[in-house]
């Protein structure tokens, strides 16, 4: 697409954002509400609309070439991402559930469930591609060195008898394969000889033989034509996907080439913009520097004279810590500053006179507070919480309306930077730098004026200010750095060699395939809590993991999530989601699982060193993900005898300290995975992990989509002979891991070569699945019961019970009213 189309798209998205911001301001100023359904609908509409704007803005940032426009869009993107997380937090508090179903709102907005998908900004990885490649090279080099060492150790450990035994086994296998091949050839020859003996001479005439061949050929060709026509009709009716549906079209390939070219142009324009920032700043300083200095000096001298005329004394010059002369004229005129000084003097006099009246005022305030509390009780209800990101979005909206909305860009066809905008920004920077020099000169000038006119010898109460600063310094405690003399590169290498820092697999979040839960609202209306779908789990990983780790401003101002727990049966994709977190954000992956830390850094001091190393490198090379596999072992109720040597509970005592040490500025996320969460101590387990995500086995729709993708990824071809619907129904209880293993077992190289002559069937996948254990109902129910005991699960159960009691009371009231009405009618009849 051209630049004009992207500019139109930018204007439309800002119109939607302007309308949405107005709705947000009216909702915040509105009266508190008590109806939960209305509140939830309002929050979901805001959430869905922000997701749509987020999609458009992310596409614009990725494709627009203008460097100054991209900065404005980036600023708005941070605000939108943070606001989405705030709305999600409010929805969780309202419904006491991490999963929400909003089919009615989607129908009103005429959207599909795919529009709820959270887009992952591509600039998370693109902006730091060079750094990630350098880290990848270091990691690959160290891992290769460790790999060669391990191979050498293995070769040394192999004894002579074991080597002879391996050679004997391989030789016997080779001889067996040759013998089998030889016997197969002999059997084929014998079969051909037997058929030649029993072959009888043909008694048909040439005409009869030709007619028979024609009949068979015409039937075969007609069946082939009808089959082709039927397939074309089904594709036309959109009942079946075309054979080249997933292959990119020429238009898509051309669009991909243009996108790559745009990325090259973006980099070139960014380099030009950075060079222009330096050159234009020097030009502004050379041309306008003296004029700025003179105007500042005149303003400050005028302020001296006005203060002298009104108060009779020269004012005290503000300190450097308070901003110097900038604090005087910050959105205030000299007259307003004088009025403030006069008001401060009057207040000091009033305080001395009204010391005796303080007690009466306190009593009055207490009465007022009681009155306010009663009013708040009357107006008790839900109200929109103030946002930390509305101001950032409003700033971006304002800059667009002021600068870019009516900008004439007919001459700027190549979409390069605008010099005038850079001059305005750099003029402010130059003014601040010159102001520091002017402040030093004017302080000296003020001292000279005081000595000559007022004869004031020194400033007052300097000692008191120093004492206050000393008290503040005493309160701060310095944290000991155990590796102060070491470089970050040496720490990074040590963690790789110890196996605590591992290489994440190249997996995208879109590879975690799932489908929307279309029965969520209906089940909740019948007081049945549905199991979440895989698409809902993918959205939570994007919200709680990817967006905060990818953006520093979002992580600092949004609701902070320090730890996340993924619970579910084996094969569901917990480990895959952790690797997707790292690949989408470019994060480092640290493995602090009990089986990985066993025998490393022994003792109490060793444990402190290990934690210090991991989290120091994680903070310095953020974003980072700290993975704890089999997290229930860290919080065991009772350690089994077989695992006592591994010391799985090493991190349990230091876990709360680790969570406290992670601050809003540290983009570090602790992620735990577990198959058996019920083996852990519930209270400490739930305290350690703020967010708990229960990953279920796939439902029917997810299984159908999974089978499609897994078969195609392993080289299979989908035909009408493969009944995917029946296969999805039969494989209820099996997970994604089971499907992939079955597909690899069936789709071998030999079977893939036969696909054109012998298409796949659903029966072929059932045999390898029967050898694997599915997820039984007992395991699923135990996970559900455990989740109901978590803090959020308890709140959800309590809220559902209260709602059920309210509905029961309403039904009783209606029933009593109806009975009373019937009794009144009967009495009236008796009187007649």
Image (cartoon, helix red, strand yellow):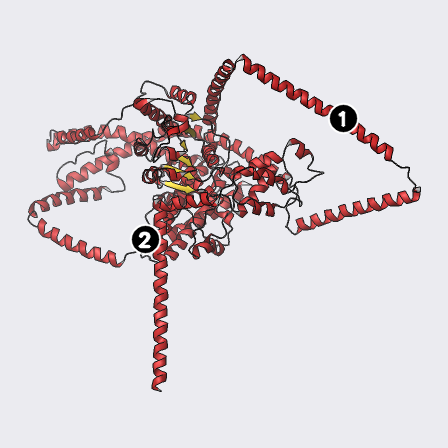
Residue ID at (65%, 52%): 237
Residue 175, placed above or below residue 788: above
| Residue 671 in sight in this render | yes
Residue 262, image x, y percentages = 54, 34
Q: Nearer the viewer, residue 813 or 411?
A: 813
Q: CA distance from mark 2 to mark 1?
A: 84 Å
SS for dot 1: helix
Give the left or right position of residue 433, taking residue 37 as reference. Answer: left
Of labels 2 and 1, earlier in sequence is 1
Say whether residue 808 is left or right of residue 570.
left
Whether 9 is drawn above or below 192: the answer is: below
Q: Which mark is residue 185?
A: 1
Specify the farthest residue to the bottom: 832
Image: 279 above or below 230? above
Percent of width and height locating residue 475: 20, 30
Write down the residue under mark 2.
383
User: How many residues crowd around disc 2 within 10 Å: few (fewer than 14), some, or many (20 or more)?
Assistant: some
Q: Nearer the viewer, residue 807 or 100?
A: 807
Quadrant where the C terminus lies?
A: bottom left
Marks 2 and 1 in Cβ contact (< 8 Å): no
Q: Residues within 10 Å of mark 1 (few under 14, many from 20)?
A: few
Q: Which mark is residue 264?
A: none
Report if residue 669 is visible in the image: no
* Place of residue 691 in the rendered image (x, y in percent of width and height, measured from the top left): 37, 41
Q: Quadrant of residue 618?
A: top left
Q: Give the secondary structure at mark 2.
A: loop
């Amino acid at each position: 697409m051209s630049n004009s189309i992207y500019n139109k798209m930018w204007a439309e998205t800002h119109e939607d954002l302007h309308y949405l911001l107005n709705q947000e301001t009216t909702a915040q100023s509105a009266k508190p509400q008590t109806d939960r359904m209305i509140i939830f609908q309002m929050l979901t509409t805001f959430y869905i609309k922000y997701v749509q704007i987020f999609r458009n803005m992310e596409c614009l940032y990725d494709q627009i070439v203008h460097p100054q426009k991209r900065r404005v869009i980036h600023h708005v993107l941070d605000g939108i991402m943070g606001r989405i997380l705030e709305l999600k937090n409010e929805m969780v508090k309202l419904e006491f559930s991490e999963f929400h179903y909003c089919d009615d709102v989607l129908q009103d907005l005429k959207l599909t469930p795919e529009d709820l998908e959270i887009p992952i900004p591509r600039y998370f990885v693109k902006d730091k591609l060079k750094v990630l490649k350098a880290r990848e090279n270091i990691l690959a080099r160290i891992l290769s060195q460790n790999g060669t060492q391990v191979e050498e150790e293995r070769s040394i450990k192999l004894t002579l008898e074991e080597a002879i035994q391996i050679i004997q086994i391989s030789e016997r296998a080779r001889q067996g394969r040759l013998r089998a091949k030889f016997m197969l050839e002999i059997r084929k020859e014998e079969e051909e000889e037997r058929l030649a003996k029993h072959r009888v001479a043909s008694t048909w005439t040439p005409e009869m033989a030709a007619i028979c061949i024609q009949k068979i050929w015409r039937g075969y060709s007609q069946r082939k034509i009808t089959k082709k026509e039927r397939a074309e009709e089904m594709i036309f009716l959109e009942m079946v996907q075309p054979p080249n549906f997933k292959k990119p079209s020429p238009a898509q390939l051309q669009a991909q080439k243009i996108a790559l070219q745009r990325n090259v142009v973006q980099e070139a324009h960014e380099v030009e913009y950075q060079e222009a920032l330096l050159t234009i700043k020097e030009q502004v300083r050379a041309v306008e520097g003296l004029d700025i200095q003179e105007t500042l000096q005149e303003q400050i001298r005028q302020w001296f004279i006005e203060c002298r005329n009104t108060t009779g004394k020269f004012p005290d010059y503000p300190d450097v810590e308070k901003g110097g002369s900038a604090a005087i004229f910050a959105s205030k005129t000299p007259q307003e500053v004088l009025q403030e000084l006069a008001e401060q003097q009057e207040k000091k006099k009033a305080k001395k006179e009204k010391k005796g009246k303080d007690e009466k005022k306190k009593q009055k305030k207490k009465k007022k507070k009681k009155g306010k509390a009663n009013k708040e009780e009357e107006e008790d209800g839900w109200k929109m919480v103030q946002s930390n990101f509305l101001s950032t979005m409003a700033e971006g909206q304002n800059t667009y309306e002021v600068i870019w909305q009516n900008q004439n860009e007919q001459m700027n066809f190549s979409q390069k930077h605008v010099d005038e905008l850079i001059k305005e920004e750099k003029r402010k920077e130059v003014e601040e730098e010159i102001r520091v020099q002017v402040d030093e000169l004017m302080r000296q000038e003020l001292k000279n004026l005081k000595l000559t006119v007022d004869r004031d010898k020194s400033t007052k109460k300097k000692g008191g200010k120093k004492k206050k600063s000393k008290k503040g310094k005493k309160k701060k405690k310095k944290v000991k750095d155990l590796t102060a003399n070491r470089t970050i590169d040496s720490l990074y290498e040590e963690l790789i060699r110890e196996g605590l820092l591992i290489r994440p697999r190249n997996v995208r979040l879109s590879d975690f395939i799932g489908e929307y839960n279309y029965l969520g609202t209906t089940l909740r209306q019948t007081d049945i809590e549905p199991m979440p779908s895989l698409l809902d789990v993918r959205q939570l990983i994007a919200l709680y993991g990817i967006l905060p780790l990818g953006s520093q401003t979002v992580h600092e101002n949004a609701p902070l999530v320090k730890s996340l727990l993924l619970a579910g049966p084996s094969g569901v994709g917990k480990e895959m989601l952790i690797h997707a977190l790292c690949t989408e954000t470019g994060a480092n992956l640290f493995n602090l699982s009990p089986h990985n830390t066993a025998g490393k850094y022994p003792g109490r001091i060793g444990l402190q060193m290990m934690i210090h190393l991991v989290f120091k490198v994680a903070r310095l090379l953020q974003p980072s993900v700290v993975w704890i596999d089999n997290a229930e072992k860290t919080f065991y109720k009772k350690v089994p005898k077989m695992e006592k040597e591994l010391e799985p509970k090493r991190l349990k005592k230091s876990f709360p300290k680790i969570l406290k040490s992670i601050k809003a500025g540290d983009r570090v996320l602790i992620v735990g995975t577990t198959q058996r969460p019920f083996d852990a101590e519930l209270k400490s387990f739930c305290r350690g992990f703020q967010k708990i995500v229960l990953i279920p086995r796939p439902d029917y729709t997810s299984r159908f989509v999974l089978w499609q993708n897994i078969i195609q990824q392993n080289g299979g071809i989908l035909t009408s002979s493969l009944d995917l619907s029946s296969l999805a129904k039969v494989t209820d209880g099996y997970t994604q891991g089971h499907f992939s293993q079955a597909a690899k077992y069936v789709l071998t190289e030999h079977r893939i070569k036969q696909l054109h002559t012998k298409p796949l069937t659903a029966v072929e996948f059932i045999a390898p699945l029967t050898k694997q254990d599915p997820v039984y109902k007992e395991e699923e129910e135990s996970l559900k019961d455990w989740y109901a005991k978590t803090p959020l699960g308890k709140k959800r159960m309590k809220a559902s019970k209260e709602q059920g009691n309210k509905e029961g009371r309403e039904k009783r009231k209606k029933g009593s009213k109806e009975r009373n009405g019937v009794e009144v009618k009967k009495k009236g009849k008796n009187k007649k």
